[in-house]
Structure formats: structure tokens, C-alpha cells
Amino acid sequence: MHVFLRTERLVLRPFTEADVDHLLALDNDPDVMRFINGGRPTSRKAIQAQTLPRLLRDYPCSGTRGYWAAEENATGAFLGWFEFRPLDDHSLAVVELGYRLNKAAWGKGYATEGSQALIDKGFTDLAVERITANTMAVNTRSRRVMEKAGLSFLRNFTGDWPEAIAGSEHGEVEYELIRTDWEQPR
């Protein structure tokens, strides 16, 4: 198994076709999907035809993936995934940070640990200049992870929701971290 990144408690590895069942379980938990699609279920067909191809995609500017399966280092248990994806196919200057973890992983610091490790890798090894992350304004837990990982609030905005979900009327928020701020003593 190729490991993209290892932390004290996490392994981030490329997705494979064998991850369909993990993704199906993750995307069918209404609590996990509350701020994504309002908690609606996702079909196996949608996972295979839409979700997995997006997670398996290589980006030309990096020659690597932008989404990583997250496993617990000690047990190998699937915890979810992290996104560290270039916003432009031809440049690593700006990447989007994201995460989706199963409920068993919530409240244990995994989202912060994985985010901080990706941020450090981006600024030290990948020539990233700016990291951005978005969530619904009402998603306080995700906003707290962004702050703990070192990102700062940038702006509120209204996204284009195909179908409104509870809380979408409050809009979304964007956080960011730029290289010069990351380089400052903490």
C-alpha cells in the first residue's frame, strides 16, 4: 500500500476501487452528510459512477491525487477522507482543504491532525502558496477544525445550492492560510 502521509495516528493513502463499501457507509450516514446534502442517502451506483472517479483522479500539476483515504494508524480502520486538491489543474499555488470522517472518528482530533499534516506537507514539499477551506456557516464543528488547523476566517458568501438544506439560508464561510502566515512563529 502506497502511503501519501503518515501522522502519529493516521495514514492517508490513495483511494482504490475496493473502497466502494467504505464510501457507501460514510455517505449514507445522515449525520455525516447533514451539511453536504441534508443527510440524504447516496446510492452505490452514484458512489461508483461519480464519487469514486473524483477521488481517484490524478491532478496534472502534482501527478498525484487530491483526495486521500484516512485510516487509523494502529488498526487500519477506515475513518473517512481528506481533500487537498489544487483549484487549478495546472498549478499547486492554491489548494482546497477538506475532510469527511465517520462519526466514530468525531471529537478525537483526527480532522485537525490530518489537516495540519496536509498543510505542513503542502507548504514544505508541494510549493503551495495558499490553502482555502469552505463550509456552511452553521457547521461550527468544521469551522473549529479549520481554526485549530491554523486557517483564518476570510469571508461569508452565498453558494449556489442545487437544493436548499437546513442551514443553507445562513450561507457559507471561507477560511484560508497563506504561506507567509504559516511561516511566522506559532
Image (cartoon, rainbow, N blue to C red):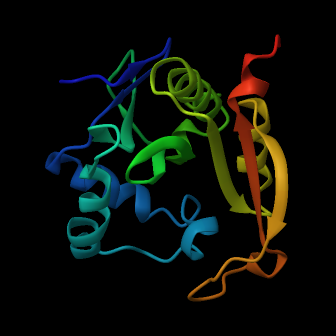
- Name the side, left or right, on which 14 lies relative to 149: left
State the image coordinates of residue 80 (x, y, percent, origin top left).
43, 43
- Name the side, left or right, on which 10 lies relative to 94: left
Name which quarter of the figure residue 134 lies in: bottom right
Q: Quadrant of the C terminus?
A: top right
Name which quarter of the figure residue 72 lies in: top left
| Residue 83 can be seen in this image | no
State the image coordinates of residue 176 (x, y, percent, origin top left).
73, 44
Residue farthest to the bottom, as pictured: 163
Pick the front one: 131 or 5: 131
- Residue at left offset 26%, top offset 38%: 63
- Residue at left offset 37%, top offset 39%: 68
Q: Quadrant of the N terminus?
A: top left
Image height of 112 relative to 102, above or below: above
- Residue at left offset 62%, top offset 26%: 116
How many marks on residues?
Answer: 0
- Name the side, left or right, on which 131 lies relative to 67: right
State the image coordinates of residue 69 (x, y, percent, origin top left).
35, 39
| Residue 57 can be seen in this image | yes
Image height of 125 relative to 34, above or below: above
State the image coordinates of residue 49 (x, y, percent, origin top left).
21, 71
Image height of 71 relative to 74, above or below: below
Name which quarter of the figure residue 73 lies in: top left
Image height of 75 relative to 14, above or below: above
Pick the front one: 133 or 6: 133
